[in-house]
Amino acid sequence: MEQEERWKEQEVNYAGVVGKNVEIVSRNPKNYFQAISDIENCETVTIDGKLFIPETNKPLPLVVVVPGSLGVGPNHKAHTETLVSEGYAVFLLDPFGARSIESTVENQTQYSFAASAYDLLVTYQTLSQHPLIDAERIAAQGHSRGGSAVLMASMRNFADPIIGSESGFAAIYSVYPWCGHQFKNSQTGDTQVRVIVGEIDNWVSIKQIETQIQAINVNHGKATMRIVDGAHHSFDRYEPVHHMSEARVAPEAPILFLEDSGAMIDPETKQPNADLVDYDIFVHAMKQGYGRLGADIGGIGDQPEIFKKDMLGFYSQCLNLKEAQSE
């Protein structure tokens, strides 16, 4: 089968708006500790995406859309088109292309989860400077691995040392995220967080997500969660549910907690260790018997429309597009 050309090489027009390529200078930290404490010594990588800005004479709210382990797919493009049609500015990020990665379904350690979250913060920094983007109304929407990234980027523990305490996303829409990494002290400040996940998702753990939502709210954050009845992973896709036998998942593995420094708590010694990386934790989970092969993906019936309605409702509440257009 012929490989699809990279996202940045495609010519795309959504609702009469032509997508323009934007490059983002990011880094490849090995873990959260390095991202927070030693980012200048991390390898540089220039990632990219397409920015869609409806015709306007005043700054618009922006939604940054981040794909999951399969890279930029038809559902992410469809959501981008929907949001552009509604009048939002949208940036669909491709974190894989510049890293020469096609998929992380079989191996999530090709680059770190910390790098995924760092990508979001430097994307925020770059796009908040655009004259037609309202820096106070920037949201991030991530799917699966991207859902993990946007949640981590919302954590003040992680964001403050990188972009400063006065900057950050106004809203986070985290779509069926893996929540296996969590700060012990989960602080999201004023950011409004919403998670949506399928009831029978067998890629990620609903219990882990619930723990993360509870931790945010206990720390005076603003987080809500919706579980969609009878829905699988990627239920927002207009495609039949099917099994991906190559997927490597461990939804029942214990949560790996992080100190405010970003250091991972060693699951064996229970002490923070700044040298631990994702691979170490995944190997430990496999040895404990939590890993397995195979998981399901796809939407059933009106599930993609349920998702679309929830997505638009969240942004209507958080980004106040009509107010921005009338100012």
Image (cartoon, helix red, strand yellow):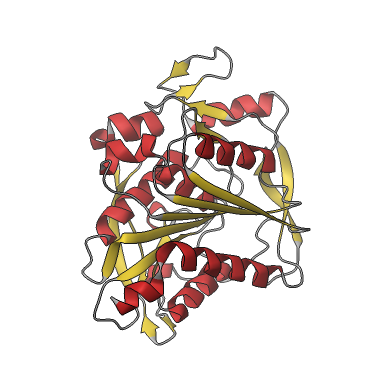
Q: Residue furthest top?
A: 269
Q: Position of residue 37 (x, y in %)?
A: 29, 29
Q: Position of residue 80 (x, y in %)?
A: 47, 72
Q: Residue furthest right?
A: 230
Front position in the image: 66 or 327? 327
Q: From what the image shows, is residue 72 above or below residue 142?
A: below
- Quarter of the C terminus within the rendering: bottom left
Q: Give me the residue at 36% from left, 73% from top.
A: 323
Q: Give me the residue at 66% from left, 45% from top.
A: 204
State whether residue 205 appears in this view.
no
Q: Position of residue 73 (x, y in %)?
A: 55, 66
Q: Give me the residue at 52% from left, 63% from top.
A: 314
Front position in the image: 82 or 110? 82
State whether residue 85 appears in this view.
yes
162 left or right, relative to 95: left
Q: From what the image shows, is residue 208 above or below residue 69?
A: above
163 left or right, relative to 285: left
130 left or right, relative to 14: left
Residue 236: quadrant of the picture: bottom right
Q: Position of residue 317 (x, y in %)?
A: 48, 64
Front position in the image: 72 or 151? 151
Q: Residue furthest bottom?
A: 16
